[in-house]
Amino acid sequence: MWFRYILIRPIGVLVSSMKRFNLQISGEENVPPYGPVIVVSNHQSYTDPVAIAVALRPLCRHRHMWPWAKADIETGTEGLLAWCLWKFFGVIPINREGGSPNEPIELSLKYLRRGEAVLIYPEGSRSPKKKLRPFQYGVANLAKAAPAPILPVATYARDSDGGIQVIIGKPFFLPPKKMKYELIEAIEEKVEDQFGRQIETLRQWASTLPQDKKGMKLMSKMIRLINDFVTRQDISFDYLYKMGEREDNEYIRDKIFELLPAGWEKVENENRARPLSFLKKD
């Protein structure tokens, strides 16, 4: 049990109920009580992580949730709330100054195989009001590498009273890979190609499992198998953070967009400081 969450949750609930925030949640019935699960959300405000943690209490009561966050927050440049998140709960750091590009995937697989949750904001930074920016490839890469359900979450400020709204969608898996392995017997396969096909098979199998305690344990074991295989074989983790394709990214983005109210729009690339280029598709 995530005791740190149990201790801090009353504070989060108290703050969320204040008139200034007035947190309202819908779709709680879609939250799996156990991991592994990849939580994906749009990003509008610095309060998003707290709102999501409160909204996902059925999951967070049993499993730790690790957010991807830029390493800068450790210095306090992103505010006190972000610094407390880093120090008290821990994050999966994203180093925008040229850190190891595969570290987020490695750490995410480590936590997912333990049956925990990973929270990702694929836009990479906070977006303007009522806009959904293009997604970085980090979430698609992880979703293709890990046979774990994706839980879509939308957060925004309501027009009626300015309060925070969190809408939780139904968990989903990426659709089967469209690529056909034609003439596969006529060519010499690379180990990476074989491995990619094996992961695809595991993901399709995982999508048929019930998302109860027993089913989620089986998914955790699948992720452990993938992680152990990469560790033992001559396959770099670099392969795992290049698995996502444009169609995967857009599929996930559409799932978030469906949860947002009328008046929102998808926007194309805008000028943004230090994009997470290593999480993009080459």
Image (tube, helix red, strand yellow):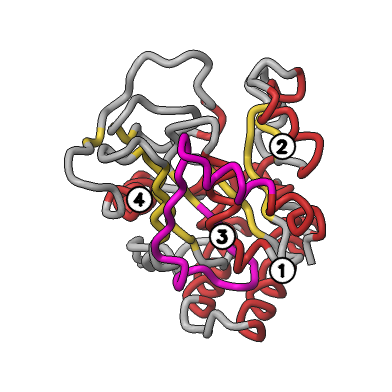
At label 1, counting other C-alpha atoms closer than 10 Å, the crowd grade (few under 14, some 14-19, many 20 or more) is some
At label 3, counting other C-alpha atoms closer than 10 Å, the crowd grade (few under 14, some 14-19, many 20 or more) is many
Q: CA distance from mark 1 to mark 2?
A: 18 Å
Between discs 3 and 1, the one toward the N terminus = 3
What residue is rendered at 72% in x and 40% in y?
Answer: 91
Q: Secondary structure at mark 3?
A: loop
Q: Secondary structure at mark 2?
A: helix
Q: Is residue 219 magenta?
A: no
Q: Which mark is residue 256?
A: 4
What residue is rendered at 71% in x and 64% in y?
Answer: 63
| Three-letter code for the amino acid on which mark 2 is drawn | Leu
Circles 3 and 1, Cβ within 8 Å, touching? The answer is: no
Image coordinates for residue 171, horizontal then vertical, percent: 44, 67
Image coordinates for residue 233, horizontal then vertical, percent: 77, 58
| Three-letter code for the amino acid on which mark 3 is drawn | Leu
Q: Which mark is residue 56?
A: 3
| Three-letter code for the amino acid on which mark 1 is drawn | His
What residue is rendered at 73% in x and 28% in y?
Answer: 83
